[in-house]
Image (tube, rainbow, N blue to C red):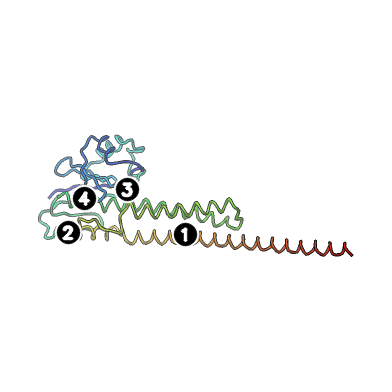
Amino acid sequence: MHNANIVSIYLPPDYSAQEIAEQLQLTMHKGIEATHFAQINEFRWLFFCQFDALTFVNWNRLQIIDALEKLGIEHATDFEAQMLHQDYRLIVDDTLQQSFSVDNETIRLKSFTPSNLMVVALVLAQSVGLEHFEIEVERYYGIGRRMLELSGRFSWIHRKQFSDYAKQISLLRHDMVLDLMLLDKPDVLWDNQELEQLYNKLSESLELKSRFDIISYKLDTLKEDIAMMMDLHHHKHSAFLEWIIIILILFEVVMAIGEHFQLL
């Protein structure tokens, strides 16, 4: 039996597998989907996913801090408080009757294989990435509420803000779906029942689907609110134009009547 830990940390954007390999002086290999990995020794691994999640398998705290500092991460020494992260206890137990078992705190694997570790690292990275989008959606909720409160004073400036805001919401959804790959399982799982079961169990334990559905619902609500306010503005704008037309018609009528009496 071997005890280890696994920690997935959300990095600032725009890191690449090549940059991480160069800064940490490691050789990164292509893994499943958008995952790259490096094997330091039999039980120590590093995984990087394209959605800016770096996952450490069997690294102690000082080793993690050292790696983050080499990557130029601010607050590396206090990453537990300053950076989004999730961790699990990882146990390799060859006496397991099944290939794995999962609870809220521990992942038990029958063997320490690259495929098993990649699946675990991917799901944990997806969970950390999802937490990032959960925070972003809450931030947009706050912005949207303030904009709705100002909607009574709708002007062309506010109209542009609403339009830009709706665009940002759409981009946020696009990034979440494209980056986290939650709608489709990795192709390798279709050919390996044990890996698929491990992926499904971890996803269920971390509530990836329900969290994704909640975020999607909130984004839909935000878009509906924005659409309603834009429709209200268009209605007000149309009504304003109608009144201008009516006033112009009345003005023409008054002018015509005035000219008529002048001719008399």
Q: Residue 118, labelled with which disc? A: 4
User: Quick check: 157 left or right of 217?
Assistant: right
Q: Quadrant of residue 206?
A: bottom left
Distance Cα–Cα, label 4 vs label 3: 15 Å
* Circle nearer the N terminus (4, 3): 3
Distance Cα–Cα, label 1 vs label 4: 36 Å
Q: Residues within 10 Å of mark 2 (few under 14, many from 20)?
A: few
* Circle nearer the N terminus (4, 2): 4
Give percent across and percent down for residue 195: 18, 57
Residue at 35 percent of width and 59 percent of height: 212
Disc 3 and disc 2 in contact, CB within 8 angstroms? no
Disc 2 and disc 1 in contact, CB within 8 angstroms? no
Instruction: From the image, tell me which residue sits under label 2.
Output: 191
Distance Cα–Cα, label 1 vs label 3: 24 Å
Instruction: From the image, tell me which residue sits under label 3.
Output: 51
* Circle nearer the N terminus (3, 2): 3
* Circle nearer the N terminus (2, 1): 2
* Mark 3 or 2, closer to the camera: 2
Instruction: From the image, tell me which residue sits under label 1.
Output: 223
Q: Residues within 10 Å of mark 4 (few under 14, many from 20)?
A: many
Give percent across and percent down for residue 50: 30, 47
* Mark 1 or 4, closer to the camera: 1
Q: Residues within 10 Å of mark 1 (few under 14, many from 20)?
A: some
Distance Cα–Cα, label 3 vs label 2: 25 Å
Q: Secondary structure at mark 2?
A: helix
User: Foreground: 55 or 90?
Assistant: 55
User: Foreground: 116 or 107?
Assistant: 116
Q: Amino acid at mark 4?
A: Met
